[in-house]
Amino acid sequence: MAFLRDLKIAVRSLARTPALWITVALTLALGIGANAAIFSVVRAVLLRPLANRDEDRLLYVRQSAPGIGVENVTFSVPEIQDIGQGLKTIQKLGTFSAIDFTITGLGTPREIHAGVVDGNYFEVMGLKPVLGRLLTSSDDGPNAAGAVVLTYRFWTTSLHSDPGVLGKVVRLGSVMGSRTGTIVGVLEPSVPYPVETEIIANIVTSPHHLSATMVTGREHRMTEVFGRLAPSAQLDAARAELRATYAGMLLAHPETYKTGDRYTIDVTRMHDQINSRANTILWVLFAAAGLLFVIACSNVANLVLARTVRRESELAVRSALGASTAALRRSLLAESLVLCGSGVLASLAIAAPMVAVLGRYAARFSVRADGLSLDFSLVWFGIALALIAAVALAFVPRLPSADASHSFSLNSGGTRSSTGSSRRLRIFAITQITASFLLLAGAGALMRTLFELEKTQSPFDTASVLALNLPVMSYGRTPEQVNNFYREVQRRVGTLPGVEHAASGFSVPWRDAQALNIAFLFAVDGAKRQNGEEDLRGRFRSVSPDFFDTLGMPLLEGRDFKDSDRDGSERVVIVSQSLAQKLFPGQTALNRELRWTDGVMKFIGISTEPRRIVGVVPDFDDENIIPSPVMSIYQPIEQEGWSGRLFVRAKVDPYTLVPVITRTIHEMAGDQPVERASTLEDIRAEVLSPNRLNAIVFGGFAAVALLISVVGVAGVLAFSVSGRTREFGIRMALGAQPHSILRDVLGEGLVIASIGVAAGVVFGFGLARLTAMYFAEVQLPGTLVFVVSAAAILSAAVIASAVPAARAARVNPVEALRTE
């Protein structure tokens, strides 16, 4: 009952100082809430087990070629056969090829992301169906019936969990033709990897995968490989066995695996591979949340300790009147519990919405971030820490003893504070400044990266160019009819009111990652080469006439493609400026003969016959926001290549043209999908959004940390001023000017901030170098970022010092001496 009375007294006492109560509650709420939210995301994305059976045995096999700058080369069928022979540490391999199908038979025809897999895939992945069955070895082979498995997300969102979908026959179209498949099952909820798919089909549904060149071509690579570790095997043993087998394969085919390409193979656990992209960013964010928690706790300790020291005279009076040390401790504990308990309650109110925001943020980096909810395990941990802090804060202050209270003087007790308390306050404030500096420097590095991305300009007006997906509908059409359809679409759309130009191509800049990644070896007769230089690798792009006018890219030399540049006519290409300058410095590249020399050409139907260079255009890096010199080679679609994308340069708002463009195309073919209409400016902004979110999230953490630190420094200086009132009075009575008092207090704030910044610089450089050792993708902040962060901290310290400094400068000497 006595403690309940103390709690009531604590509430009434704190109600008289609402600023302190609100500041402590909000500070703790931010510290605990932010940590609970980010840990919920980290646990769900990085730590939560996969749905796959025995996930610790599930492996991802990756082939890379650093010599040609490719991190993931994927595999060809002969390579998979070679590395899969005689493995003892890996039970079985499963394969997956990403492909886009135009699906007909489930409502309106549409383009979907799909995976083509072998019969081992689901067994290796350790997944099970929620409806029907999955694909097995009986679904392998060119004579098998087409079979399709729906992913759980596609089934629930697009088909509304309709159980009647089993047995439906769908048609799957691609640039190489179309096939039918029967829906045989629905996959359980699982992480889609390597790409997010809507259906998974057997190999027979893809004409391309049935081609002889796909089966026999060693350089025809488009397949991901997964494995399942044998029960008694270890990962290191599997890696060593795979590398030994792979080394033998490289030696057996030197014509394919050139020494300079540096082909290598590696294997990792599937869980680690899935988390690889989100791993760094989320752990860094978790560290930032931890720093914020340290800052919050330091600030709360500062505020509560300063308040307790100011109450020394009150505590002494209560002791003199007979209050025991236990009673005094109990009253301090009650007050600490009210303060910390308020912070915990406030943290619960803000943690849930923070999880929702951070979940959308994390979804940019991981497919596992969908449907996140608050993880209460860390909330309870935060509550426990808050309770521990409350007890600690109640026992930190020194209480007057009963003997000491007899000699207590009312004239002196109110203004004297212990040197130890003042020292602790400064240590807490320096800790806050140090942590704030680290957060601010990290946010500054991200802001610098974002600024560099934002200031990068595209070589044309992206806001006026509209891109639309027109997936190829090849069923019942010959290749010539398909080409005629796209040509007619381009002609009709080009005549619509408000349309300046229209063209078609195979890939949308910055969006179609798989298509944009296509690059082949080539050679040009008479080109200048360095000693020992192999054939160069250039980006392959297929476009229609008027493509460059549509995008607003001027021709630097030569001519554009013409309608007469079709199959059967002279083969021509247009090259980028970097390619022309590299191969023909000080000369013209026009009319030179270029030939594709890549071995994969014979597998994809691209001729290695000579082609005449008829034009040169500016460099356009359609893969990266920050452009670099690019070796691009453009071919006419109707000679060789693929289509599927429509580009429109508009005289008006491009989005107002979408309905009329769609209607025009549907008048030509009612079942033709018209999808993902977006300006190139918005596509570019979408690509930038992860960097923008990084800067916003870390900038938000840094801003909150800086605000809390400002409050902490102001509190320390306010406490110092209140303890030095008599000193200031004597100095002013002896002739000191107010500006000298003001300067002293401001200097004290700057000293605290400078020590904190110095500690932050030391920790920052050390932490940056340590992080760079383990995470190559983490960029060091740089000297400028450290300087700007230090300036921001010192400026904030001056602002925080201003109020207590002004109060010190206004001390009345007579009143100050009278209170003593």
Image (cartoon, grey):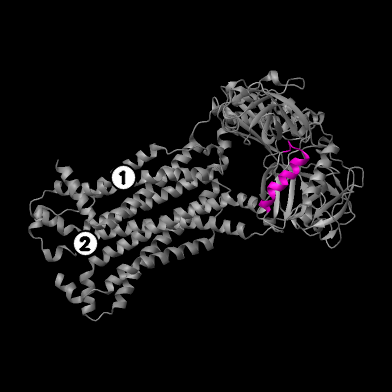
Q: Name the quarter where the C terminus is drawn.
A: bottom left
Examine the rendered structure and indicate whether residue 54 appears above or below residue 743.
Answer: above
The residue lying toward the viewer, choosing from 586 and 448, is 448
Please state which amino acid type lies under the numbered disc 2.
Ser
As drawn, the label of residue 417 is: 2
The residue at which mark 1 appears reads as 386
10 Å crowding of disc 1: few (<14), some (14-19), many (20+): many
Please report contact status of discs 1 and 2: CB closer than 8 Å, yes or no: no
Image location (x, y in percent) of residue 73: 70, 39
- Asked if residue 533 shows in the view, the reply is no
Q: Disc 1 versus disc 2: distance between alpha carbons?
A: 26 Å
Which structural element holds mark 1?
helix
Q: Which residues are magenta?
A: 654-672
Image location (x, y in percent) of residue 770: 51, 49
Is 545 a magenta residue? no
Give the side of residue 368 with respect to residue 60, left or right.
left
